[in-house]
Amino acid sequence: MNEINFLPQSLLDEYARRRRVTRQVMLTVLMVCSLFGGHLYANAQLTSLEAYASHLTEQSNAARDRLEEMARLECEYHTLANHARVRKQLAAPVRASQVLGCIAQAMPDGIAMTGVSLRAPTPNPNADKGEAAPAATKHPAVGDLRQPVIDVQIDGLASDDLVIAELIGTLSDHPLFKSVNLPYTKEVSYDTFVARRFRVDARVRLDRPVVTTTAVQEQSP
């Protein structure tokens, strides 16, 4: 059976052209939509990266602030530690008034003191950290002790050598003084007065506290 198409060829060509244009329009719209979606996705990714970069910047700034704070606190710690070391070294267990009082109590009759000097260790903040301490002032005729000490030097005039020997014996028997010695003694004359000029050196150890026992002795029977 033969089919007869009564539509003119021009109409058929028009329909084909319309279908072709429709397909092209749909492809164009699809391409535009794809490009727009890619643009939106790229913008979203860029916004996410910008937010992440801002977060990293904030973390970096916070870390830098913490490092600066740690450096400041470490500097303050070392400063306070040095102050504590100096304060510890300055707070000796023996006061100068106690040393002078013990010397006055040990002084026998027949002696006049012309001078007393006390030389305490120079504070060294780096001593606890193992660093070398500054050279100490040399004291004549005093033995070397490893413990921190106060060097005591007593100058005076005595009626004779027996009184000087009594002073040295009293200081040597005293628990506060160590390394008591007599560097020199010589005869001096003042018009008709003859006396013995002397010097006594001793040391007071600072590695142990000193407790006054006067009250205990007064209470004992």
Image (tube, helix red, strand yellow):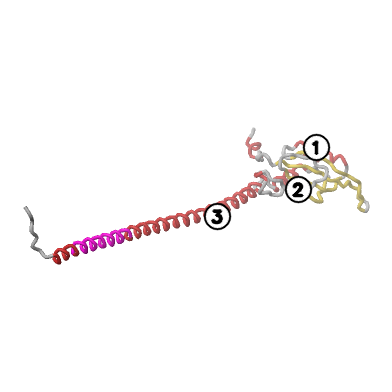
Q: What stretch is highlighted in magenta?
A: 18-38
Q: Position of residue 192 (x, y in %)?
A: 93, 51
Give the residue at x 26% y 62%. Answer: 28
Look at discs 1 and 2 and give the one toward the viewer: 2
In the rendered image, the vertical position of residue 166 relative to residue 197, given as above or below: above
Query: As rendered, which of 190 and 132 lies closer to the eye?
Result: 132
Residue that badge 2 annotates: 135
Q: Is mark 1 on a helix, strand or loop?
A: helix
Q: In this view, does 146 lie to the left or right of 181?
A: left
**Disc 1 to disc 2, how far (Cα)?**
31 Å
Q: Disc 2 residue type?
A: Ala
Residue that badge 1 annotates: 169
Q: In which quarter of the image is the C terminus?
A: top right
**Disc 3 to disc 1, how far (Cα)?**
56 Å
Q: Do the residues labelled 1 and 2 touch (CB within 8 Å)?
A: no
Does 35 appear in magenta? Answer: yes
Res. 20 image quadrant: bottom left
Res. 162 image quadrant: top right
Give the residue at x 76% y 36%. Answer: 173
- Residue sitting at the far front: 2
Give the residue at x 72% y 43%. Answer: 149
